Image (cartoon, rainbow, N blue to C red):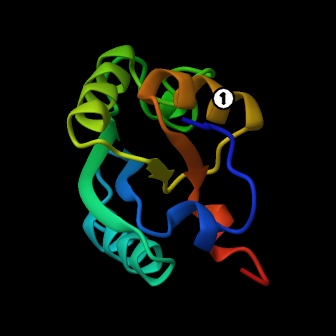
Amino acid sequence: MRRDPTGPPTSVLAGANVVLVGLFPAKDKESGAKLDLLAASVEAHGGQVVGRHVQRRGVSHGGAVKMIAPFSRRTLLSPGKAREIAQACRAAEVGVAVFLNPLTKHQRVVLGDTFGCIVISSEDLFAPGR
């Protein structure tokens, strides 16, 4: 399977099983609504949402100062959460994982290899002209 998205989100998402992924602060009470909005956008582009995964960033293990730092520069997630999502992607034959959070090109490559599918960000769906 090709893991580098080429073309507009419509062509990448059309007919694909999709998982949504979001990294949120522990106290974020809007995470469900944010994922609902992302799901609506994915479905508008032709994808079928088959799962949602949330990584919470708590205030323990270093306090609020570390809340803005990602768990991993390579994946944005903890290693356990990345493995959990990878297993879910394979089990549901997911074609695309859509992160609510912005991702670097390197993160997309690493996550695509880990999950076994194309990885994009919500920025790709909400970009002007998309």
What is the quadrant of the C terminus in the image? bottom right
Residue ranking furthest to the front? 1
Q: How many marks?
A: 1
Question: Circle 1 sits in a helix, a strand or a loop, which is it?
Answer: helix
Foreground residue among 67 and 86:
86
Q: Where residue 50 sits in the image (x, y, percent)?
A: 24, 57
* Residue under label 1: 109
User: In the shown orientation, is residue 1 left or right of residue 79?
Assistant: right
User: In the shown orientation, is residue 70 left or right of residue 115?
Assistant: right
Label 1: how many Cα within 10 Å (few below 14, some 14–19, many 20+): many
Foreground residue among 13 and 82:
13
Residue 29, located in which quarter of the rendered image? Answer: bottom left
Q: Amino acid at mark 1?
A: Val
Q: Is residue 79 above or below residue 85?
A: above
User: In the shown orientation, is residue 92 left or right of residue 24?
Assistant: left
What residue is drawn where x is 35% and y is 45%?
A: 94
Q: Where residue 21 sits in the image (x, y, percent)?
A: 39, 48
Q: Where residue 31 sits in the image (x, y, percent)?
A: 32, 62
What residue is drawn where x is 47% and y is 78%?
A: 41
What residue is drawn where x is 45% and y is 35%?
A: 64
Foreground residue among 2 and 40:
2
Residue 60, located in which quarter of the rendered image? Answer: top left
What residue is drawn where x is 60% and y is 23%?
A: 110
Q: Where residue 1 sits in the image (x, y, percent)?
A: 54, 35
User: In the shown orientation, is residue 126 left or right of residue 80?
Assistant: right
